[in-house]
Amino acid sequence: MINFQNLSKNQKLALGVLFDAIGMVTFIDIIWAPASAYLMTKMYAGRKGRIGGILSFIEEILPGMDFIPSFTIMWLYTYVFSPQKKVQTIEVKS
């Protein structure tokens, strides 16, 4: 079993593009919708992964919505658009 949390950001992007391509196959939506939601929650931890999983499930289960690349959008949100938490350092002068 793959531990999705330990993948590099480039590996997550490659898997995301693959998963988005699988999601474009229309006749497997009933099977792929719950699988994509599960995979999304495993690739992205916490609240972000749970919300992404719900949105991925909805996108896959609704007819005609297969063109939305939900995994790629989540990768972009996580690694490009999401503000990074900055560590604040305090300099102590003696």
Image (cartoon, rainbow, N blue to C red):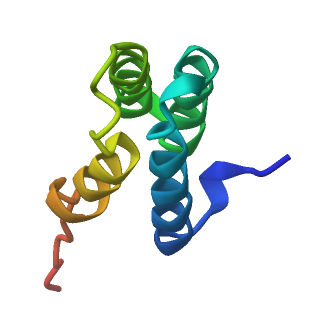
- Identified at 34% across, 13% down, the residue is 62
Q: Is residue 20 above or below residue 62?
A: below
Residue 40 screen position, x and y as percent: 50, 35
Corner quadrant of residue 57:
top left
Q: From the image, which quarter does the C terminus lie in? A: bottom left
Q: Is residue 5 above or below residue 11?
A: above
Residue 91 is left or right of residue 69, and the answer is left
Residue 43 screen position, x and y as percent: 55, 44
User: Residue extending furthest bottom?
Assistant: 94
User: Residue extending furthest right?
Assistant: 1
In this orientation, which residue lies closer to the viewer: 2 or 47?
2
Corner quadrant of residue 56:
top left
In this orientation, which residue lies closer to the viewer: 46 or 29?
29
- Identified at 78% across, 51% down, the residue is 2
Q: Is residue 83 above or below residue 71?
A: below
Q: How many marks?
A: 0
In this orientation, which residue lies closer to the viewer: 82 or 63?
63
Q: Is residue 58 above or below residue 91?
A: above
- Identified at 47% across, 68% down, the residue is 9
- Identified at 52% across, 67% down, the residue is 14
User: Residue extending furthest front?
Assistant: 27
Residue 80 is left or right of residue 53, and the answer is left
Residue 47 screen position, x and y as percent: 38, 26
Residue 42 screen position, x and y as percent: 60, 37
Residue 22 is left or right of residue 92, and the answer is right
